[in-house]
């Protein structure tokens, strides 16, 4: 078996091979580490790495499988990369900032602890922009992270390191987090699968529990791997006031989509969509039809007002932190942080209240009725692919002859506002530049199972990263 086969092996397949002893956890981890070292100076998806510690853990996992030990965890021996925003006790978490370069955590985030308890092997942390507040992934702390499909292009943000590592075959599963699109946008930019669960499905402790836009979620290369990971991560934690009592257990099958009605909008009535994204989205919609779904376009007249309100909601919440932090640490933050401060300060505080009022009105008049009629709703995830890797928040790109920021090209934040709706980002194809495109499948509140059913059927119709022709050309790409 080649290194490439090992690096792109799904967690589902690896677990089967661990159990039948045709593959060892150490063998898989060593392939992942070899790939990680190969791309460290080009893609640069990793923050702190724990390779030697992870090898020791892999040897212990290997011994468990050799002995046929009882109670082997559902992720035993699977290499896991954890976003540098999630706490791990005794390890450094920097949130991409030199301010936190000495910040050793005293506890582990609940979802990460559950993955560790299930046997997952944390071998590295993944890069993020400073404070996880940018749709590109670069910082003074960790440097620039690039898209494996095209060096110089962004992998997205803020979970860009996780997405880039998975896309390059340098991790098997990874964690992400999402408050305005930070799982789904990088997943689509890098051609992997990312899941934003309903708020409360995966526990957050502390203040993040009370920001209903913010969720942790799994990132992987297959829908099956996202399901396995979600099953472990979900469920109540008493430290999280808003965590749901019952976890979710996704069991995937070969069921088609016959009987399901799926609505779609190409542009939500207000986005400028590049020709490449339109083409690949149309192909994705055809794949859903081939899978048996009834796919219908729906008019959207309500989105434009919501988008700025949803973004403003989060900017208002973030503004106090940004202002205080920049005032105290202006000499060591990344060059773009003053621009983040300027943007946050540009939103009046009253927009927070307006966002809540408008969200309720739009759900009652439009989205509630839509989800009564349709089982899921599909849109592109991003409108454009080739965002420069070093882009700042207010930099512009040309989409169909018009200039937009990368925030303007990300069609995600509405589904943070409607935080009970599960959303899966899936690869849909590639732009003419070679950079991946993606769609997002939005479900009814708490209906994770239908989203996974749609995603799995779509993946059967449009497989991705399953062979060399559908993977980044890592060698020639980096010459």
Image (tube, rainbow, N blue to C red):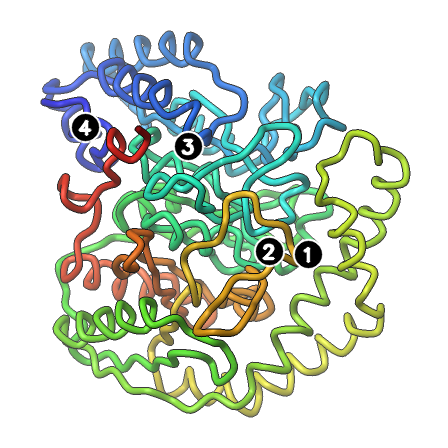
Q: On the rendered structure, is 332 left or right of 278?
A: right
Say which residue appears at 57% left-offset and 64% top-offset.
Answer: 416
**Residue 377 - label:** none
Residue 363 percent across, percent down from the top left = 56, 83
Q: Nearer the viewer, residue 271 or 246?
A: 271
Query: Which quadrant is the C terminus positioned in?
Result: top left
Say which residue appears at 27% left-offset and 61% top-offset.
Answer: 428
Q: CA distance from mark 2 to mark 3?
A: 24 Å
Tag 4 and tag 2, C-beta contact below 8 Å: no
The label nearer to you, 2 versus 3, is 3
Q: Earlier in the sequence, mark 4 or mark 2?
A: 4
Tag 1 and tag 4, C-beta contact below 8 Å: no
Q: Earlier in the sequence, mark 1 or mark 2?
A: 2
In the displayed structure, 42 sits above or below 340; it is above
Which residue in the protein does label 1 denote?
211
Q: CA distance from mark 4 to mark 2?
A: 33 Å
Which residue in the protein does label 3 denote?
43
Q: CA distance from mark 3 to mark 1?
A: 32 Å
């Amino acid at each position: 078996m080649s290194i490439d086969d090992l690096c792109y092996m799904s967690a589902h397949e690896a677990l089967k091979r661990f159990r039948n002893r045709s593959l060892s956890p150490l063998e898989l981890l060593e392939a992942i580490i070899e790939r990680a070292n190969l791309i460290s100076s080009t893609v640069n998806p990793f923050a702190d790495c724990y390779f030697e510690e992870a090898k020791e853990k892999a040897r212990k996992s290997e011994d468990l499988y050799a002995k046929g030990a009882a109670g082997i965890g559902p992720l035993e021996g699977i290499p896991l990369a954890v976003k540098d925003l999630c706490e791990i006790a005794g390890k450094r978490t920097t949130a991409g900032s030199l301010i936190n370069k000495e910040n050793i955590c005293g506890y582990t985030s609940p979802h990460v602890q559950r993955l560790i308890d299930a046997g997952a092997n944390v071998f590295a942390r993944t890069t993020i922009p400073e404070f996880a507040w940018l749709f590109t992934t670069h910082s003074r702390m960790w440097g620039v992270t690039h898209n494996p499909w095209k060096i110089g292009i962004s992998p997205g943000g803020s979970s860009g390191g996780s997405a880039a590592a998975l896309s390059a075959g340098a991790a098997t599963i990874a964690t992400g987090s999402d408050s305005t699109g930070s799982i789904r946008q990088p997943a689509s930019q890098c051609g992997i699968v990312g899941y934003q669960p309903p708020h409360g499905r995966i526990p957050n402790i502390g203040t993040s529990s009370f920001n209903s836009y913010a969720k942790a979620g799994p990132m992987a290369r297959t829908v099956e791997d996202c399901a396995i990971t979600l099953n472990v991560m979900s469920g109540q934690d008493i430290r999280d006031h808003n965590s749901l009592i019952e976890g979710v257990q996704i069991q995937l099958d070969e069921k088609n989509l016959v009987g399901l009605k799926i609505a779609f909008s190409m542009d939500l009535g207000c986005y400028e969509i590049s020709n490449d994204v339109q083409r690949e989205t149309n192909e994705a919609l055809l794949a859903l039809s081939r899978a048996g779904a009834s796919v219908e376009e729906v008019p959207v007249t309500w989105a434009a007002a919501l988008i700025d309100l949803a973004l403003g909601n989060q900017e208002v919440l973030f503004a106090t932190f940004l202002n205080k932090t920049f005032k105290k640490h202006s000499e060591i933050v990344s060059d773009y942080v003053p621009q983040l401060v300027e943007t946050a300060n540009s939103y009046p505080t009253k927009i927070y209240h307006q966002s809540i009022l408008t969200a309720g009105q739009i759900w009652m008049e439009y989205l509630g009725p839509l989800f009564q009629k349709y089982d899921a709703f599909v849109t592109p995830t991003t409108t454009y692919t080739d965002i420069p890797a070093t882009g700042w928040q207010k930099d512009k790109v040309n989409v169909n002859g018009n200039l937009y920021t990368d925030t303007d090209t990300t069609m995600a934040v509405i589904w943070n506002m409607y935080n009970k709706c599960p959303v899966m980002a899936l690869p849909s194809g590639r732009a003419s530049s070679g950079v991946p495109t993606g769609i997002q499948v939005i479900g009814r509140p708490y209906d994770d199972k239908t989203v996974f059913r749609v995603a799995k059927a779509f993946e059967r119709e449009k497989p991705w990263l399953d062979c060399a022709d559908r993977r980044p050309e890592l060698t020639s790409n980096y010459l």
